[in-house]
Structures are given as structure tokens and as C-alpha cells.
Image (tube, rainbow, N blue to C red):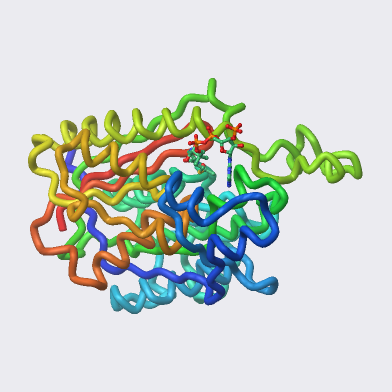
Amino acid sequence: MSAPRRVGIAGVGYYVPERVVSNADLAQSLDTSDEWIRSRTGIRERRIAAADQAASDLGLAAARQALADAGVAGESLDLVIVATASPDMVFPSTACLIQNQLGAVKAGAFDLTAVCSGFSYALTTGAQAIAAGEAERVLVVAAEKFSGLLDWTDRATAVLMGDGAGAVVLTSDAPRGEILASVLGADGTGIEQLGIPAGGSAQPATHATVEQRLHFMKMNGPEIYKFGVRIIGESVAQALAKAGLPESALDLLIPHQANIRIIQSAAKRFNLSMDKIVVNIDRYSNTSAASIPIALAEAKQSGRLQPGMIVATVGFGAGLTWGANILRW
Ligand code: ACO
């Protein structure tokens, strides 16, 4: 049996909506303050999509940038994977909407739901398709319009999330961003901690579900916080070991942007100074699956990613789910 082919990141892209909503803006309609939000989460502002922008529009803009960065045409893609928990509609998939707009006529396309771990899952799945010889060029998009899933009267959740999208193009001949190891995990005993109760087949939409505000995100914040702190450390350590690397080899950490205090605890766990961690939660808040590829694209575009660097990406979220990837840039 031949060894699996290497897979690398040939291009990156991201898109965030134009509208900036500050903490002070939210404090006009919610019983909250800039001071509370900044000190508890690290968030200063977030981007909120326009009413006529759906997740596919955000994802398409990120995808076009990633394709241009890679010098790859949409027609040459073999697979389009879209990680999203805020798809345009239940079905058809948001991946098919993006595939159509890109003219990716020979690509298979599907959505993947792992919420804030969605990019980690999609990157791993896309890389495996190439490694197995089933695809040459894979587009991975993470696109979220969480503003449509939030209860804007609930200060405990409304202040945390924003909209945005990121994308990467994976190929077997990319000179950078080789995926060295991946770790995916799930713990379904945590289903109650974070989710949207209604709108699926268990509780289809009725007047009652709307009146009870069951179509919005509900979260046990403190439990998710503890989970995030623990799982970043565990999964990145596991992925580094799988790649055959010591923890000291880590040059840059790109964590899911859920809370600056969770990110600071990861810095402590891996003895990293904050300049070795990509942070943009202050500007974008938590964009769920999109937060890692947005941070990755910003890191590349600003020259923070240097050839040879060992980079870890790590996501965690509802399910509960988690995923870590080790890259050699
Ligand atoms: N403004 C002011 N006060 C608030 C706000 C707000 N926006 N939100 C909550 N409070 C109050 C609470 O009511 C509570 O008041 P009380 O003590 O009088 O009851 C107090 O602040 C403390 O609330 P806690 O929930 O204990 O605050 P905590 O320090 O834990 O911070 C937070 C809450 C920021 C949500 C934190 O728990 C957290 O970041 N959790 C992880 C969130 C996360 O990672 N989510 C991932 C979602 S991603 C996905 O998969 C969709």
C-alpha cells in the first residue's frame, strides 16, 4: 500500500460584513456594558451581516479570495465542503449554493455541522479526501451568520457572537501549510450545554416554539468555558504527539475565538507568549466555525506565517465537539 499523499493549504481567504456593532451599541438595548463584555470576553465589537446577506454570500466572498490566493479556478475543484451551523436554509446545502456560484461544475458539495469545531472537522475531512486520492483540489469554507440565530433580548448570548466567513483551498502540491496531524473528538453527553432547541425534526416550528423563543441559541456559559479551557490543552497536545513533535515545537497557535480568557489559559498551558497566538476576538467576537480560517487568513496576509513554522489550529463547540490540526507552514 502506498503512503497517503501529503496535503497542503494552497490559498486562504476571509470576508467579514461591513457593519460594525460595538459593545456600546448593544448596551443601548441590553442590560450590559462595554466594561462587562470586554473584561469577561475580550470582545470590543463584532460584524453583523446585512439583512440580504446569507451565510452563502459571506462564504462565497471568502471562497473567491482563497481561490485567487491559490491561483485555482472554481471549475477545477473536486470537492466543496462548507462548515456552518447557520446555513441559508435547512436544505439544499449551503455548499451547493456556493458550488453553483463558483461554477465548480465537477465538484461534489456538502455541508458539515460541527458548530464551532466545524472548520477543524472540514479541514480534516477535505485533507483526507486528497490523501486518499479521491480528490486533487478541495475548497473548505466556514461561513456563519449567527446574528440570525441569537435572541437579541438575551444578554448572556447576544453579546458573544458575530458574522463572518473564512476559506482555504487544499491541494496535494501546495508548498505551504502541510497538514501533519489531526485530532477530532466528540462527547454527546454534552448536548444540553449549547444548542438551538427547535426548528429540527424533534421540535418543528410552531407558534408555541416561536413564542417560547426556542429557535435561538441557548448556552450554559460556565460549562462551555471549563470545557474550552480543558479541551484546547488536551487536543493540541494529542495532535502534536500524533505529528511526532514536542510541545516546544509549537510556533503559532490559532485557537477558536470564544473568549480571551480561554485563549490566555491556552497560552499558559503551552508556555506561549501572547504574540505566538493569533487573536482577533476583540474585532470580530465569536464567529463560530469561521473564527479559525478568518484568523489564519489574517495571519497569512499580515506576514505572521513564516515558512517552516509549526502551527496548531484548535476548535471546540456544541455537541460537544473539538478538533485540532498541526500544520507546517
Ligand atoms: N452583561 C452584563 N452582565 C451579564 C451579561 C452581560 N452581557 N451576561 C451575563 N451577565 C451576568 C449574569 O447574569 C451573572 O449575573 P449574576 O451573578 O447576578 O447571576 C453574571 O454576569 C456572571 O455570569 P456568568 O455566566 O457566571 O459569567 P462568566 O464570567 O462565566 O462569563 C461567559 C460568561 C462570557 C458567557 C463565559 O461563561 C464564557 O465565555 N463561556 C464560554 C462561551 C463559549 O465559549 N461559547 C462557545 C459558543 S460557540 C458554539 O459552539 C456556538
The location of residue 317, given as percent across then percent down, is: 48, 39
**Looking at the image, residue 45 lies above or below residue 91:** below
Which residue is at the front of the view, 93 or 305? 305
Q: Percent from the top left, x then y, of residue 177?
A: 20, 58
Residue at image coords 45%, 52%: 38
Which quadrant of the frame does ligand 1 lie within? top right
Query: Farthest residue toward the top?
Result: 189
Q: Position of residue 29 (x, y in %)?
A: 70, 59
Does residue 52 appear in this view?
Answer: yes
User: Looking at the rendering, which quadrant does residue 62 occupy?
Assistant: bottom left
Residue at (8%, 39%) from the top-left corner? Answer: 248
Residue under the image location 47 percent in, 67 percent down = 106
Residue 217, above or below 70: above
Compared across the picture, whether 248 is left or right of 138 comes to left
Compared with residue 77, is residue 32 higher up or lower down, i.e. above or below?
above
In the rendered image, the residue lying farthest to the right is 207
**Rendered location of residue 12, percent (x, y):** 32, 67
Quadrant location, the N terminus: top left
How many marks the image carries: the answer is: 0
Hey, which quadrant is residue 300 in on the image? bottom left
* Quadrant of the snapshot with the C terminus: bottom left
> As drawn, is 135 to the left or to the right of 243?
right
User: Which is nearer the eye, 240 or 282?
Assistant: 282
Q: Is residue 6 visible?
A: no
Displayed quadrant of residue 316: top left
Residue at image coords 37%, 70%: 13
